Amino acid sequence: MDYNKINNTSSNIFNESQFDQSRQEDVVNFLREPRTNKKLSYQYPVVQEATSYWDQLLAGRLDSISLIPTTKCAVFTLFLISFYMGLFGLILFGVSTNIQEVRIPYGQECDQQTYCKITFFVEELMVTPVYIYYELSNFYSNDLNFVQSINKDQLMGYDIDQKKYCPNAYLQSQMIRQNLSASGHHLFLDYANPCGLAAKYIFNDTFLIQSDIEFKINITALLLPMYKKQFKRHQYYFKQWLDVEHEYVQSWFIPQIHSSRFILYGLINGNLNRGSYYLYINNQYPIKIFGGEKTLVLQSASELGTKGLTIGLVLLGGSGFCALSALLIYIIKRNKTKTQVQQEQI
């Protein structure tokens, strides 16, 4: 090792005009001092007799930060969380209760009919956009067999072993549309793509809403990109009997945890004024499949989107839980303190 080169480099550093003699002495003393005794300012590498906590924090010289929870800290934190959860919960709850909603049950009324017409009434103005949902009550899509029948690889365009992954419904003859592919070609294949219970029981009713004019129902741009990325057509598109890149199909394959299915069908880019309307239904989905009711739901929107009633109730419940926890901790601590004081007096 070339020690002379190192010494020359050190000499050049201390000969710079920006350092005066006193600064050189401070640096030399600092380098000679044991590491355990060094106290470094975040601005200059000099020795100081005392360094504030804030200076050490800015200099990044704190070895650790010890957080010691206290009763006051816990109570304050819980009350703060309770306040904000309650605030946002009340906002969501208030917005949800002000959203206009029209529910049109038609499963029983249109049973055994291929085409059905229902008259419904809108009580108050529904401002654009108006969201249209279909609801299937008593439809347990969270059933294990139903969920396992949704094969992500197949929905991404890959070939799979239908018998292995779709044991309950793998034949094309078991599906709703048996002889026609999504591209319009005739199917001469034995195995279905996509397969499984979810594909077999896909919802296939269609709707039309009219008054004096016909309202166009937009069925595109309904899902977030994160959901659309989970679907891709097969390279041989004519082999698939469902278009998995259609948002109507994609919405069906997104799992839900409730005992009923509540899925966005489309939206109307226009106002629905107060008055009577006609709902025309192409009734293809039999209610005997799930033994429940089919309902079409119309909802208006707000500044925060559609209904968030469930989230609002969850936030209000969490707010109450945090407030009760804070109160309980405070009472326990106070009683414990009183007991200690009484024992000391005795």
Image: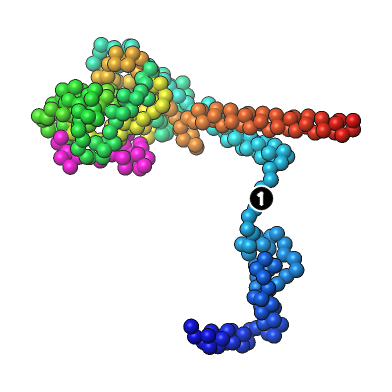
Circle 1 packing at 10 Å, graded few (<14), some (14-19), many (20+), is few
Q: Residue 238 occupies which quadrant of the picture?
A: top left
Question: In the image, is 305 to the left or to the right of 33?
Answer: left
Horizontal and vertical percent position of residue 99: 49, 28
Q: In the displayed structure, does residue 119 sit left or right of residue 166?
A: right
Of residues 317 and 10, the one nearer the viewer is 10
Q: Position of residue 345 (x, y in %)?
A: 90, 33
Q: Is residue 213 magenta?
A: yes
Which type of secondary structure does the marked residue at label 1 adopt? loop
User: Does residue 61 appear to the left or right of 99 in the view shown?
Assistant: right
Q: Quadrant of residue 176?
A: top left
Residue shown at the point (28%, 39%) measured from the top left: 231
Q: Report the predominant secondary structure element of the magenta stretch.
A: loop
> Is 148 part of what is drawn in magenta?
no
Residue 19 is drawn in which quadrant? bottom right
Kind of residue at badge 1: Ser
Q: Position of residue 55 (x, y in %)?
A: 68, 63
In this rendering, is residue 12 above or below 180?
below
313 versus 231 height, above or below: above
x 35%, y 18%: residue: 294
| Residue furthest front in the image | 1
Pointer 1 residue: 66
> Residue drawn 58% across and 84% down?
10
Q: Quadrant of the C terminus?
A: top right
Q: Nearer the viewer, residue 141 or 128?
A: 141
Q: Which segment is the magenta one? A: 210-239
The chosen color scheme is rainbow
Badge count: 1
- The x and y percentages for residue 88 are 58, 35
- In the displayed structure, 134 sits above or below 58; it is above
Q: Is residue 41 visible?
A: no
